[in-house]
Image (tube, coloured by chain):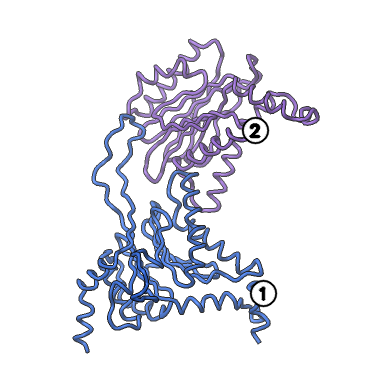
Amino acid sequence: MSRRYDSRTTIFSPEGRLYQVEYAQEAISLAGTAIGILAKDGVVLACEKKFTSKLLDDDGSAEKLYALNDNMIAAVAGMTADASILVNHARYAAQKYLKTYNEQMPCEMLIKRVCDIKQGYTQHGGLRPFGVSFLYAGYDDKYQFQLFTSNPSGNYSGWRATSIGANNSAAQTLLKKDYKDDLSLEEACQLAVKVLLKTMDSQNLNGEKLEFATLSLNKAESAPESTGNEATRGPATDEVTHRIWREQEIDELIKKLGVLDEKKEEE
Amino acid sequence: MADCSFGITGKDFVLLASDQSAGRSIIKMKSDENKIRTLSPGLALAFGGEPGEFTSLGKRRLMGGTSNELAKRGGESDMIKRDTNNFVDYVERNLRLYQIRNNTELLPAPASAFIRKELANSIRSRSPYAVNLLLGGYDKVHSEAHLYSIDLYGTKAILPYAAQGLGIYVALSTMDKYWYPDITRDEAVELLKKCVAEVKLRLAYQFTFNAIVIDKEGVKNLPL
């Protein structure tokens, strides 16, 4: 039955559904889990690495985490090749905004830009939609730290903690249970590991199977030295920093948490 | 056309003043033209142009057009007039569009960057705008007042006080002497009056001025 309506992205089925978009979302729910947690002093994104092999020449770079600009990072669930196209668009838009307005693009504006591209493929025919969901972690002056998700339909929404990809409903249940309003970034990282451990199939968790990135503020220590011109003198501004963790750092976090030991004791 | 505009900042306010003359070459045709435009609740600019640049750029463009186009366009001064107002209209509408699209007002700093970029692109185009402007704004997020001087080449300067047009020859020294970082509003108004008086005393050209003050409450007219 559905065959008649799912071959094109732009045709509604009689039930009012867009099958290609739903299939894209289906594809994403098979991809590795990614979770994001908003803390009071930062945001953490954590992903499960699906493909690990001893033979894979790993240069240490993340495959599912991208820096979009100086104050935003994104995690991907779905087809990484599709994601790279959208990430390219996002980076270009962010730099263009920076060039025009001499300030970083507000987070929601950038996300909306990416979502408008995604939406285009659900309406203008012939092509398949982007098979990607994103988790965005960002900071801007107006709304401080933010966490968003977007999906292939071109919808986006803001969250305090959420997950995309495989087992995302299980992860969200766990997050709902354990999320507290005034988490510190460190606590948020610990929560992320705990949730990933429970949602992932594998028994032992290590840096090889995870990707971690955090976004936080580097507090400005003191006002910059006076340049002599009174008008250019401004208050010291905090610097947004984002960091994609190295394997070793993830291992240390897991060890510090002792989640693996707990698990063994339970057994 | 001879222009003259001033801007003075204090901790939480900016004053902008501009002459009100419009005309061509040494002839004044109007002395009640408003050359200050409010762009948004916390942002306004005073605009004018360099007379020499106006004519040379206008001529170059006229020479490029067909005779038919020339007739349609009318006089050279007409085009000059359209130049400055056109550009300010364009900026005003674009800032409004940004506000509608993003549901947030552009702060003075990004707005100044936008205007500077538009002028920098314009000077590299076939028909450049010839507009000098003083942009004053109150930044509600950081609670600061800012003054920017932007010229037709796309040079932007952040300044505590500034003059543009003929005023630079006679009023900058006055501002230099009396301005200080914590200047109060009353003192700044007095300083502005001193500058206007200096213009009346020293320049052969007869100017009338209007002025505004921008602060956290918005843009208000300032009787001089």
Q: Eyeballing the image, is A173 above or below B173?
A: below
Give the residue furthest to the bottom.
A267
Q: Eyeballing the image, is B161 above or below B96?
A: above
Any mark on residue B31, and which?
A: none
Q: Which chain is blue?
A: A
Q: Amino acid at mark 2?
A: Ser
Number of the front mark, 2 or 1: 2
Q: Is residue B189 left or right of residue B30?
A: left
* Residue sitting at x 48%, y 67%: A150
The residue at which mark 2 appears reads as: B127
Q: Is residue B182 left or right of residue B163?
A: left
Give the residue furthest to the right.
B68
Q: How many marks?
A: 2
Q: Pinpoint residue A159: horizontal percent, then vertical percent.
A: 41, 67
* Subunit ID for the residue under disc 2: B
* Residue sitting at x 44%, y 20%: B193
**Between A16 and B215, the one nearer to me in the picture:** A16
Q: For the N terminus of chain A, give its image quadrant.
A: bottom right
The residue at which mark 1 appears reads as: A11
Q: Which chain is purple?
A: B
* Subunit ID for the residue under disc 1: A
